[in-house]
Amino acid sequence: MFKPWTGKYLFRLSTAETGTVFLKQRRIFIMPTRAGLIFGLMLVVLFVCSINYNLSLGFALTFLLASCAIVGMHLTFRNLAYLHLSPGRTTPVYAGEVAQFSLHLDNRRSYERYAIRLAFIADGNVGIPHVADIPSQAGNDVTLSTPATERGWLAAPRIRLQTTFPLGLLQAWAYWQPAMQVLVYPRPETDSPPLPLNAGTQTDGRGSAGHDDFAGIRAYQTGDSIRQLAWRQIARSNGGALVSKQFEGGAASELTLDYKQLPLTMDVEHRLARMTSWVLMAEAQGLPYAFRLAHIYLPPSIGPAHQAACLQALALYERAP
């Protein structure tokens, strides 16, 4: 293994690279494989024997095999060089799950690329490689995975691209540090207690009086009450898509997920895990909820955008010193 300072200067790994990266010649490294070393030793033996015994066919065979190795070296180098690499999209995950990074490999040359192995390198350990073939004048999308153990932003580890095509006698490789990161939410608490509903709150998302201010309609969500369905709008729609009435007030003002209201005996991560579980429970039950965490306050709402904002606040929460 190379020392950290050696890798920094030899492989130019000081900073993450943004945008599209071009694998030019100076970024490709090539060395013989174990099979290549044995092959080279065999060529030396053949050459020495041909000299000692003055074998014309031995010389011919030696130079023929050496020529094949030289051509193979060029093809191995060309199989990896001149690729364009660009980062793709990432999707937030929960702590303890596997984070996935989408990568795009673009081949703008007139020849195809075969058996290119991509793998993450973290703490000197190489992850499970993904093998990709790239047609000429086309691209290929590759997804690499790495464990997400802690909440917060998870930066993509360094990526190694490697190939031994076509003969397996030499290996060419290059390194890429994409400027990518994925948001890791706290792990939801298992067997968490029920939502902190106040008296008069109903699980159908309406207030105790049943005559809250009408705020509009939204797409039907699992758990919506039949009384909450907007039958007039459903009848007018061509496809008969289910929509629900949305109200302001009632449960929306009574269900508040407040970090400070949790028991002081719980540590920070346990509190965040419970808040995460409550956010998911409120969304599953269709209950509008307010969210309070330190200086962050989100008014009562429901839906994917509100859920993502709450989970992001929990993922990036830092306790005051």
Image (tube, rainbow, N blue to C red):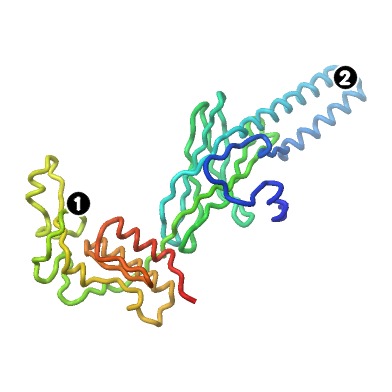
Spatial CA span between label 2 and label 1? 84 Å
- For image coordinates 71% across by 55% down, the residue present is 5
The relative height of residue 28 versus residue 214 in the rendered view (above or below) is: above
Amino acid under disc 1 = Ala
Is residue 113 or residue 252 the one in the foreground? Answer: 252
In the rendered view, does 38 fall on the left or right side of 273? right
Q: Which residue is mark 2?
A: 55
Which x, y percent locates residue 119?
Answer: 57, 46
Q: Is the residue marked by circle 1 packed among few (<14), some (14-19), or many (20+) residues within 10 Å?
A: some
Residue 77, image x, y percentages: 66, 32
Give percent across and percent down for residue 270.
41, 73
Q: Is residue 257 above or below residue 233?
A: below
In the picture as drawn, the residue positioned furthest to the top comes out as: 56
The kind of secondary structure element at disc 2 is loop
Q: Which mark is residue 219?
A: 1
Cβ atoms at labels 2 and 1 below 8 Å apart: no
Q: Nearer the viewer, mark 2 or mark 1?
A: 1
Give the left or right position of residue 65, taking residue 176 as reference.
right
Query: On screen, 229 above or below 275?
Result: above
- Amino acid at dot 2: Leu
Q: Position of residue 49 (x, y in %)?
A: 88, 27
Residue located 46% across and 73% down the image = 319
Kindly give the residue lying farthest to the right in the view shown: 52
Crowdedness near tag 2: few (<14), some (14–19) or many (≥20) residues, C-alpha within 10 Å: some
Q: Residue at x 85, y 31 (%)?
A: 45
Is residue 211 rendered to the left or right of residue 310? left
